[in-house]
Amino acid sequence: MTIFYVILSLWRMASSAKPSGVVVWEWEERKGLWIPYEVDVVRFLEGSSLKLKQKLSRNSTVNLGETDPKLNCYEVDLVNMEQMNVMSGRGYCIFLHILMFH
């Protein structure tokens, strides 16, 4: 899978009085090999996840083609934390973590 690039993930803005951190979304290409999503995809997944948590959206599945047409065959289920290639039917685990800085 060459359509995903290893790029730094999205920085979350925080005031100087609060700890800040980096949000990292990754997908597991194969056992033990986690690939970070591109920054635009991270922003999209964060926004979609926030809408779902705030109940502004009922749809837990989003299409990555909304960030890049080349990714149109990939859907992400934000509840089950899975990415699916809708063309091949192959599924991948996804993972979200936040690296905090104090």
Image (spheres, rainbow, N blue to C red):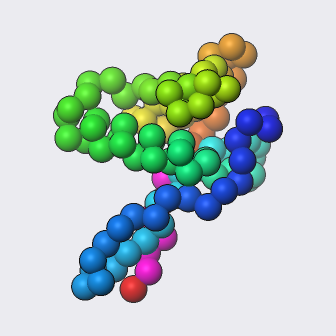
Stretch of the chain drawn in magenta: 96-101
Closer to the camera, 70 or 49? 70
Closer to the camera, 94 or 66? 66
Q: Is residue 52 magenta?
A: no
For the N terminus, which image quadrant?
A: top right
The image quarter in which residue 60 lies: top left
Locate residue 31 relative to residue 13 in the image: left or right: right
Toward the left, the furthest residue is: 55
Can residue 41 be seen at all in this image of the molecule?
A: yes
- Is residue 5 positioned above or below 24 on the image? above
- Residue at coordinates 43% horizontally, 25% vertically from top-left? 61
Locate residue 57 relative to residue 10 in the image: left or right: left
- Residue at coordinates 49% horizontally, 38% vertically from top-left? 81
Q: Position of residue 64 (x, y in %)?
A: 54, 30
Closer to the camera, 56 or 81? 56
Q: Position of residue 51 (x, y in %)?
A: 27, 38
Q: Position of residue 13 (x, y in %)?
A: 35, 67
